[in-house]
Image (cartoon, rainbow, N blue to C red):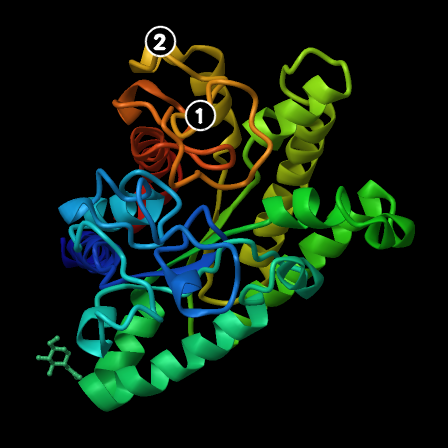
């Protein structure tokens, strides 16, 4: 009997041990672009800020925090789903300090990309600088909670990595100098190489649980539809850009598998927003939306600008009826649907 009992006992303890470890995400730590920036750009000298009305009108206190939304953005909902605060504060926001950041922090900067020539276009924080801030954060964290606790937070936190759209739309398809250096296939591989390097860099710094986010259907953003319209193609989604996103996402999925096989103790998941985002755009009424092609903060026509205009008298009154908030970014309601989806489909194992 003991010979049968002992392995069963061992199995039970192993299962309990695994369950305890899996439930332990003490903080959500965010790197990326405007899809996840909680207000870092407010503190730097760039034109690319959203710290004015009507941004944030549905956020707590109706405050324009620098999130590119009428309210919360995906990391806020993800943090909430993990039983943490319902928002993730920006590292450069002077309202917060290390006592807040110990439970979650955002280093993202709108307009940035994996390639630092992308962040140069709009004079925003390059990804390597986000990592420098992360190192500074680690030092502050050690001073605040002690080395042992800091080590736990660093290794058990969920790292959300969400960028790449700007490398294509603001860099490759905007700058002839980039297009003359790479074919689109070469450029995708170049960006994936930088993504791999980034994951390895933060792994070296102690990060273990990561979500690497793929590209959205970037040809369906109103800004790109306008280009299509101007070019005489009717203002639908730009299939070319969407195909690049699909192709890139397939390669990123492969990269994630490779990283999991190669790096001891790492757990990276590929988070793919493409399908759910496309479903919302194609069948908005299934999700309770009334408008998918035009942004809430829009003139009612196709949009040319990147940002909402503070003085625009045509901004919609109920953003929950709109898939898109401005010509580049989803509304809070869309962000919530996407976040719920990725928590259920990709991040569940970290819950
Ligand atoms: C953080 O800020 C709060 C109030 O805003 C303050 O009470 C606290 O002492 C600060 N903590 C640190 C570690 O600076």
Q: Along the polypeptide, which appears first: circle 2 or circle 1?
A: 2
Would you identify the image quadrant in which residue 223 lies? top right
Q: Number of callouts in the render? A: 2
Where in the figure is residue 241, as x and y percent of width and height?
69, 30
- In the image, 113 versus 41, the foreground residue is 41
Residue ID at (38%, 24%): 314
Residue ID at (28%, 46%): 78
Where in the figure is residue 94, as x and y percent of width and height?
27, 73
Would you identify the image quadrant in which residue 28 lies? bottom left
- In the image, 87 versus 201, the foreground residue is 87
Question: What separation in Å lies between label 2 and label 1 (alpha carbons)?
Answer: 16 Å
Mark 2: few/some/many CA within 10 Å (<14, 14-19, 20+): few
Where in the figure is residue 56, as x and y percent of width and height?
28, 44
Determine whether, in the image, residue 334 is placed left or right of residue 173.
Answer: left
Residue ID at (63%, 66%): 197
Ligand 1 has an atom within 8 Å of the beta carbon of the residue at disc 2: no
Label 2: state its secondary structure: helix
| Residue with the most extreme right position | 180
Ligand 1 shown in quarter:
bottom left
Q: Which mark is residue 285?
A: 2
Where in the figure is residue 208, as x and y percent of width and height?
42, 65
Vertical position of residue 20 compared to residue 43: above or below: above
Vertical position of residue 243 compared to residue 349: above or below: above
Where does label 1 land, which residue? 295
In front: mark 2 or mark 1? 1
Label 1: state its secondary structure: loop
Residue ID at (66%, 65%): 116
Q: Would residue 77 be seen by someone viewing this image from the given angle?
A: yes
Mark 1: few/some/many CA within 10 Å (<14, 14-19, 20+): many
Ligand 1 has an atom within 8 Å of the beta carbon of the residue at disc 1: no
Determine whether, in the image, residue 223 is placed left or right of residue 330.
Answer: right
Q: Which mark is residue 161?
A: none
């Amino acid at each position: 009997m003991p010979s049968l009992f002992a392995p069963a006992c061992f199995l039970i303890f192993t299962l309990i041990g695994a369950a305890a470890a899996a439930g332990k995400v003490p903080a959500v730590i965010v790197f990326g672009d405007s899809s996840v920036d909680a207000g870092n750009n407010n503190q730097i000298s760039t034109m690319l800020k959203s710290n004015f009305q009507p941004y944030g009108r549905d956020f707590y206190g109706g405050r324009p925090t620098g999130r590119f939304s009428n309210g919360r953005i995906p990391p806020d909902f993800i943090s909430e789903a993990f039983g943490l605060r319902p928002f993730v504060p920006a590292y450069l926001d002077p309202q917060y300090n290390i006592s807040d950041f110990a439970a979650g922090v955002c280093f993202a900067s709108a307009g940035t990309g994996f390639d630092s020539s992308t962040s140069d276009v709009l004079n925003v924080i390059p990804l390597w600088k986000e990592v420098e801030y992360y190192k500074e954060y680690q030092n502050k964290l050690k001073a605040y909670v002690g080395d042992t606790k800091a080590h736990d937070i660093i290794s058990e936190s969920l790292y959300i990595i969400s960028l790449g759209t700007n490398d294509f739309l603001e860099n490759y398809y905007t700058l002839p100098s980039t297009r003359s250096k790479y074919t689109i296939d070469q450029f995708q591989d170049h960006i994936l190489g930088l993504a791999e390097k980034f994951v390895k860099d933060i792994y070296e710094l102690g990060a273990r649980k990561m979500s690497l986010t793929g590209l959205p259907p970037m040809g369906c953003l109103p800004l790109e539809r306008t280009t299509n319209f101007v070019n005489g193609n009717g203002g639908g989604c730009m299939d070319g850009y969407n195909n690049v996103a699909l192709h890139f996402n397939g390669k990123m999925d492969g990269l994630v598998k490779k990283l999991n096989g190669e790096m001891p103790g790492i757990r990276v998941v590929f988070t793919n927003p493409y399908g759910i985002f496309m479903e919302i755009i194609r069948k908005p009424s299934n999700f309770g939306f009334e408008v998918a092609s035009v942004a809430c903060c829009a003139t009612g026509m196709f949009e040319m600008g990147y940002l909402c205009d503070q003085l625009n008298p045509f901004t919609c009154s109920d953003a929950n009826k709109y898939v898109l908030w401005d010509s580049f970014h989803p509304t809070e309601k869309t962000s919530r649907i996407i976040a719920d989806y990725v928590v259920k489909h990709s991040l569940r194992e970290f819950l």
